[in-house]
Amino acid sequence: MGNQKLYKGSLQTIILKLLATNDKMYGYEITQKVKELTKGELKITEGALYPALHKLEADGLLNVEVAKVGNRLRKYYKLTENGTKETANKLEEMQEFLKTMQHLVNPKFSLE
Amino acid sequence: MGNQKLYKGSLQTIILKLLATNDKMYGYEITQKVKELTKGELKITEGALYPALHKLEADGLLNVEVAKVGNRLRKYYKLTENGTKETANKLEEMQEFLKTMQHLVNPKFSLE
DNA sequence: ATAAATACCTAAGTTTATTATGCATATATT
DNA sequence: AATATATGCATAATAAACTTAGGTATTTAT
């Protein structure tokens, strides 16, 4: 597993992008999806995830809908209208960041 | 300018990479070089830079050599042998991070 | 039975940066 | 000549975003 600390600052963007692709997801599902998509390279800890979800909800970017599956709770999160807009912004910023960083650390293989 | 907070965690790698390319540099020069290379997208603050340089030196990855230019001091930093090894590691981690992130936020344009 | 997986959560502490200062010399502008 | 900007170093207080460690409870696999 690579250097986890490089991912600092990108958690919100990752969550928003997943919800843009998957419509609605619950917390545990997000951790599993990220693990799967990154082949174990990135493991979202719950101590980071849940506060992040609560903040996104407080900021009006996510809606929550509680579901009961068997005897257990699930909280499904979904993008609000504002959340969809903000996702586009954050993805653009992320793309610019990745391009800049790629250029910085390896000019030969820059994306532009 | 994009989202500065995405760069959190990558400062050490950026410094090491610059020193791998430019042999020796002083602090202020690093801030200017980064601004130039990123076309103003990333501005290294001095409050982040100097403590980072001191830490890299304390960790034995950099050597410092003081020079006097006119009446003003410059502290030239240079990779140690260990620093060169660590730079290679950190650049590999960075490449993996960038690839993973690219894949996460935009699977279509993934680098592999 | 017991362990591991699923599912939520919070609090203390750490890391890494930003913001705000401070000091001093050199150069450009009014 | 006075003032602002650029060069060059540095630290301290604060903030942001995590990790680590802990808690509760249900479901499935061993």
Image: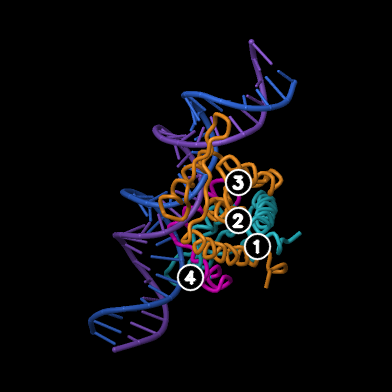
Chain colours: A orange, B cyan, C purple, D blue
The answer to whether residue B63 is visible is no
- Magenta span covers which residues? B33-61
Q: Label 2 to label 3, Cα distance in Å?
A: 14 Å
> In which quadrant is the N terminus of chain A drawn?
top right
Percent across and percent down for residue A55 are 44, 49
- Position of residue B62 relative to residue A92, above or below, is above
Residue located beneath label 3 in the image:
A4
Three-letter amino acid code at the position of disc 1: Val
For marks 1 and 3, the one nearer the N-term is: 3
Q: Residues within 10 Å of mark 3 (few under 14, many from 20)?
A: some
Q: Residues within 10 Å of mark 1 (few under 14, many from 20)?
A: many
Q: Are marks 1 and 2 on the same chain?
A: no
Residue located beneath label 2 in the image:
B13
Does A32 lie within the magenta span?
no
Q: Chain of mark 4?
A: B
Pick the front one: C9 or B9: C9
Pick the front one: B75 or A31: A31
Percent across and percent down for residue C18 are 41, 59
Q: Label 1 to label 2, Cα distance in Å?
A: 8 Å
Dot 3 falls on a residue whose secondary structure is helix
Dot 4 falls on a residue whose secondary structure is strand
Q: Label 3 to label 4, Cα distance in Å?
A: 41 Å
Left or right of C21 in this view: B5 = right
Residue A105: which numbered mark, if any? 1
Q: Chain of mark 2?
A: B
- Position of residue B84 relative to residue A107, above or below, is above
Residue located beneath label 4 in the image:
B69
Q: Chain of mark 1?
A: A
For marks 4 and 2, the one nearer the N-term is: 2
Percent across and percent down for residue B60 are 59, 47
Three-letter amino acid code at the position of disc 4: Val
